[in-house]
Image (spheres, grey):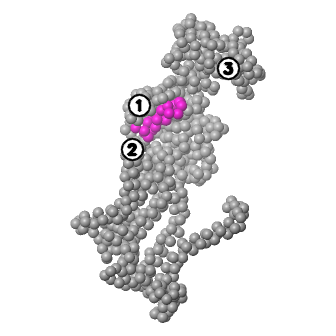
């Protein structure tokens, strides 16, 4: 068990910047998710913590030790790879046992610990099989068992669910959450899937182009995105972003007018609101526009309409029916609006 | 599937296909079978000027030895002319060449496959250039220094030269085998507690066996079949099998015994058959797994 600290960590390949000045304290027992689109530097950050990638600048501390110069094996962490990284020539039992074997942990403990780890991920029936004879989900569970068998300082997981089908992803996700609850080991989890981030994390780090965009709990990130990138990356559908101008707390743009907004902002801004925060208006709505499409989701109906040149999504009741081209009036409460600077994309606080 | 397809093909095409295969097998196998058969005859039969039927019926063999088959060729080659010594030398040379090539090749191929550096590519290109050169160009350059250093004619010198000639190929072949093994495997092992070398030894090598066997076989064949290097760099008493066979054929100064050569050729070929049959599964999986083919 340990806390992990990253101080001014950067990674560069010649002129290409992979990770730029990353600072973070990860608390003991925390479940931290690194979230971002591909190429944002999240995996590089994790690989630097694991010791698989050299650190160009900065320091990484695990517990009381600076680990910059330590080999991966000396950092006492375990890692789950996207492609599982199972040893094809060994049985499941031997795979799980391998870390104990190479670390010279007394032989008499091996069997008990392997069986315990296998039991935690429900692998007992498959111990004598080789990885080639397992399904994707079973392979991922072997990788998990191999990671937990050693009881390391921290777990690193690099997109562990992305090779699984949708259904298996949900159940394995639950299993990972449960494992973390049982073992209470510091975990760093890399993903590009915002739902995984929201469901698993104590805290989420949103990254883009090597830079940290926002650090916060899933709710903070969802409710108060620090900039337009985070706003458009988190949530399904993504937050609606409309550019326009604001004056004396009134936001106006083509087909949209919202009053009662904070007075601090003025001039050209980007206004954001979530599909589920908007509603059908009784009389005068904030948006009045023809409907572009109607999508039935089952539990709700998703309308999209063109506002200020952008398609915005509005989530309405499941019984709502309308034709494409009908005029719809939409109410958006001012309290549900987010205002971002148009040039920097940064959030403007109320 | 193939059966279903065979049924759909017109009968004439089928006949043609099978005839062609049979013809091809005969063309490939007959010269060897002919040599094996002939090696048990005397020269007057096998190289008969009257009729090639003599080689089949052994007319002269009957006359000279009293039986249709004779082991005289083998006796002469192996005992009288010390072919056993050449065979022994060949064993030493091939074992050494294969072992050294594979040791350097697996280590080097692994390093080059996992190195992200630019120079790894240029090392491989340089290796390719040396591989492309005819062996004899290297050997002629070696002769004078080897005489002066007084290391000409002995087995270790030939072994080193053969390893040098073989290494680029071994490196290329093993390099592409290592590339086909995902990097995640080494990284898993290193996070699990291995050093780089332990990851190589405990995790990567067990997966590499088909590649090692295939590359090893090619190294073995190079050492076994080499003529240019061993003929030029070995003294008469240290000769391996192939130059020895050539010396049985005689030269301008001395007359050879062709039947000794024939018997020796058969003796030298049989182990190859056994070897390929024994390792055929690994070789096939190795050839299909790796990108480079022999």
Disc 2 target residue: B118
Q: Is residue A26 magenta?
A: no
Task: For mark 2, give the secondary structure.
Answer: helix
Question: Chain under label 2?
Answer: B
Disc 1 target residue: A10
Q: At x 42% / y 58%, what residue is drawn?
A: B170
Task: For mark 1, give the secondary structure.
Answer: strand
Give the distance between the C-alpha atoms of the residues marked 1 and 3, in whole angstroms.
Answer: 43 Å
Q: At x 45% / y 63%, what residue is drawn?
A: B218
Specify few, some or many for label 2: CA neighbours under 10 Å numbering under 14, 14-19, or 20 or more: few
The magenta stretch spans which residues? A33-55
Do the CB atoms of the residues marked 2 and 1 lie less than 8 Å apart? no
Give the distance between the C-alpha atoms of the residues marked 2 and 1, in whole angstroms.
Answer: 22 Å
Answer with left or right where residue B83 lies relative to residue A331.
left
Q: Is residue B293 above or below residue A63?
A: below
Disc 3 target residue: A305
Q: Quadrant of the N terminus of chain B?
A: bottom right
Tell if the residue under mark 2 belongs to the same chain as the one under mark 1.
Answer: no
Q: Is residue A214 above or below residue B23?
A: above
Q: Tag 3 or tag 1, which sits nearer the N-term?
A: 1
Q: Give the image location of residue A127, x and y in percent.
A: 59, 51
Q: Is residue A14 above or below residue B179?
A: above
Q: At x 51% / y 62%, what residue is drawn?
A: B283
Choose top left, top right, bottom left or bottom right for residue A201. top right
């Amino acid at each position: 068990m340990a806390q992990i600290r990253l101080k001014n960590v950067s990674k560069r390949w010649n002129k290409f910047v992979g990770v730029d000045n990353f600072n973070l304290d990860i608390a003991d027992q925390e479940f931290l998710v690194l979230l971002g689109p591909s190429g944002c530097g999240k995996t590089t950050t994790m690989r630097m913590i694991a010791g698989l990638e050299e650190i160009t600048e900065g320091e990484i501390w695990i517990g009381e030790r600076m680990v910059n110069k330590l080999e991966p094996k000396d950092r006492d962490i375990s890692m789950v790879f996207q492609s599982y990284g199972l040893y094809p020539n060994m049985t499941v039992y031997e795979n799980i046992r391998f870390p104990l074997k190479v670390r010279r942990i007394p032989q008499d403990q091996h069997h008990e610990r392997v069986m315990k780890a296998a039991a935690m991920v429900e692998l007992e029936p498959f111990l004598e099989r080789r990885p080639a004879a397992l399904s994707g989900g079973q392979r991922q569970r072997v990788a998990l068992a191999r990671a937990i068998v050693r009881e390391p300082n921290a777990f690193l997981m690099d997109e562990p669910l992305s090779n699984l089908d949708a259904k298996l992803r949900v159940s394995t996700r639950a299993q990972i959450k449960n494992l973390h609850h049982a073992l209470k080991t510091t975990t760093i989890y890399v993903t590009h899937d915002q739902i995984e981030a929201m469901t698993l994390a104590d805290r989420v780090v949103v990254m883009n182009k090597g830079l940290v965009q926002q650090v916060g709990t899933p709710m903070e990130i969802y409710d108060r995105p620090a900039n337009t990138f985070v706003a458009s990356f988190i949530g399904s559908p993504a937050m609606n972003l409309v550019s326009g101008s604001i004056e004396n707390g009134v936001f106006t743009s083509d087909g949209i007018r919202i009053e009662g907004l904070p007075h601090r902002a003025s001039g050209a801004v980007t206004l954001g609101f979530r599909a589920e925060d908007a509603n059908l208006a009784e009389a005068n709505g904030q948006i009045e526009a023809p409907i572009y499409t109607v999508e039935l989701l089952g539990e709700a109906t998703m309308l999209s309409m063109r506002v200020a040149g952008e398609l915005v999504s509005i989530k309405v009741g499941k019984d709502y029916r309308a034709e494409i081209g009908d005029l719809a009036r939409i109410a958006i409460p001012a309290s549900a609006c987010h205002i971002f600077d148009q040039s920097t994309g940064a959030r403007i606080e109320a | 599937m193939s059966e279903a397809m065979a049924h759909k093909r017109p009968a004439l095409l089928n006949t043609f296909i099978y005839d062609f295969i049979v013809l091809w097998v005969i063309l490939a196998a007959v010269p060897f079978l002919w040599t094996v058969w002939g090696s048990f005859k005397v020269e007057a039969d096998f190289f008969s000027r009257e009729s090639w039927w003599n080689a089949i019926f052994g007319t002269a063999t009957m006359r000279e030895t009293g039986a249709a088959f004779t082991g005289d060729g083998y006796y002469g080659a192996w005992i009288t002319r010390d072919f056993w010594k050449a065979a022994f030398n060949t064993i030493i040379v091939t074992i050494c060449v294969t072992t050294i090539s594979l040791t350097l090749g697996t280590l080097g191929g692994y390093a080059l496959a996992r190195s992200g550096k630019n120079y790894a590519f240029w090392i491989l290109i340089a290796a390719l250039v040396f591989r492309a050169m005819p062996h004899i160009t290297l050997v002629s350059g070696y002769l004078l220094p080897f005489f002066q250093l007084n290391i000409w004619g002995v087995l270790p010198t030939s072994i080193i030269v053969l390893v040098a000639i073989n290494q680029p190929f071994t490196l290329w072949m093993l390099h592409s085998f290592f590339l086909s093994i995902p990097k995640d495997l080494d990284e898993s092992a290193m996070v699990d507690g291995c050093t780089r070398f332990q990851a190589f030894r405990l995790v990567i090598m067990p997966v590499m066996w088909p590649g090692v066997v295939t590359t090893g076989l090619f190294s073995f064949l190079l050492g076994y079949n080499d003529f240019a290097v061993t003929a030029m760099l070995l003294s008469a008493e240290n000769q391996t099998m192939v130059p020895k066979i050539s010396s049985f054929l005689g030269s301008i100064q001395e007359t050879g015994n062709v039947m000794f050569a024939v018997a020796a050729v058969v003796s030298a070929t049989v182990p190859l058959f056994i070897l390929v049959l024994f390792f055929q599964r690994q070789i096939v999986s190795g050839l299909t797994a790796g990108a480079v083919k022999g």
